[in-house]
Image (cartoon, grey):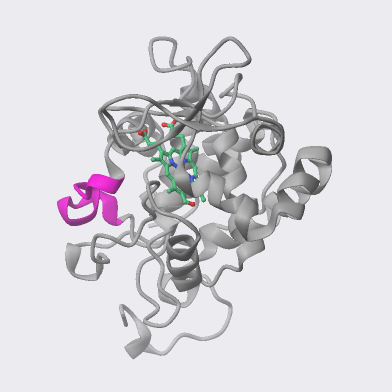
Amino acid sequence: MSKEVDYDAVRKDIAACMEQPGYDDGSAGPVFVRLAWHSAGTYCKDTKTGGSNGAGMRYEKEGGDPANAGLQHARVFLEPVKAKHENLSYADLWTLAGVVAIEEMGGPKIEWKAGRTDFTDDSKVPPRGRLPDGAQAEDHLRAVFGRMGFTDDEIITLSGAHNLGRCHADRSGFEGPWVMRPTVFSNQYYKMLKNMEWKPKEWSGPKQYANDDLGQELMMLETDLALLKMNKDLVHKYADDKDAFFDDFAKVFAKLIELGVDRKDAGYEAAPKKSNDAGAP
Ligand code: CCH
């Protein structure tokens, strides 16, 4: 059986199914980016477990993690693309969907390589609790992203994805978008962090910050404001220099979606493969 997949056709099909008129702000783009990020963000560099290989969210163990609430929408939107391209793995589809969504929403081109395979049972699915909690601060960010192998500055760059989408009370408990145009990839998020004053939102929900100076209530999480304490100069640089942000973001997102990918197992490497390599954890 041929393993050929027409990835240009896959990209077009992903772009087409981003359009979802009745959903959120009319685009599935933001939730595709979050799907790609959560599929990779479970990685642990010490144990080499988790990461974007495997598509573990198809199993209750990972898909049912409260941190992944809402991502079933993204997976359902992408199902027709998977059905049309039978040799495409879910793990490749989900990461490529994030890359295509960022490009389609006006963001940078991001390097993406095929070769992820899907687990056939849940034995290699990472434990729950590896994704960040928006109610915590910089020590937590350092622990979670440090486990994946990211520096403080890389955390600040990756967090720029909060230019996109919104929080949903019925998913995370938090509510609202970070910027005025949540389906356009830009550096607005850093401008908001640099220029606006953020006060605790008065409500019965979890702690988040609010500002309505622009005529619509925008939000920040505790983890978003923590970036200013980690490296305020970099946040300000990105607020003033969109190109610098786009360049750095493209590199760090490409690194994120490579976490946990071992192409030797998938037979994608030119080097001869020993028969006892197959399926090694
Ligand atoms: Fe995020 N994010 N994220 N995030 N995120 C949420 C939504 C999005 C945290 C918490 C939340 C990254 C980092 C963090 C996106 C991309 C990235 C939500 C709302 C919470 C809470 C979920 C809901 O209710 O639907 C925390 C904490 C961190 C710590 O750093 C990184 C890194 C990325 C990608 C590179 C995107 C996109 C969304 C919008 C999703 C949507 O459905 O609109």
Q: Position of residue 10 (x, y in %)?
A: 52, 37
Check the picture and name the quadrant holding the N terminus.
bottom left
Is 39 placed left or right of 228 in the picture?
Answer: left
Residue 29 in the image: above or below residue 134: above
* Residue 169 visible to the viewer: yes
Badge count: 0
Residue at image location 48% in from the left, 14% down from the top: 26
Residue at image location 41% in from the left, 43% down from the top: 35
Q: Position of residue 67 (x, y in %)?
A: 29, 47
Residue at image location 41% in from the left, 67% down from the top: 43
Q: Position of residue 278 (x, y in %)?
A: 34, 80
Query: Is residue 59 a member of the stretch shown in magenta?
Result: yes
Is 180 placed left or right of 133 in the picture?
Answer: right
Q: Nearer the viewer, residue 212 or 119?
A: 212
Residue 167 in the image: above or below residue 152: above
Residue 5 in the image: above or below residue 188: below
The quadrant where ligand 1 appears is top left
Query: Is residue 73 a member of the stretch shown in magenta?
Result: no
Residue at image location 70% in from the left, 38% down from the top: 194
Q: Quadrant of residue 229?
A: bottom right
Q: Quadrant of residue 174?
A: top left
Q: Position of residue 244 (x, y in %)?
A: 81, 48
Extent of the magenta region: 56-67
* Residue 6 visible to the viewer: no
Main SS class of the magenta portion in the image: helix
Is 117 placed left or right of 187 in the picture?
Answer: left
Check the picture and name the quadrant holding the C terminus.
bottom left
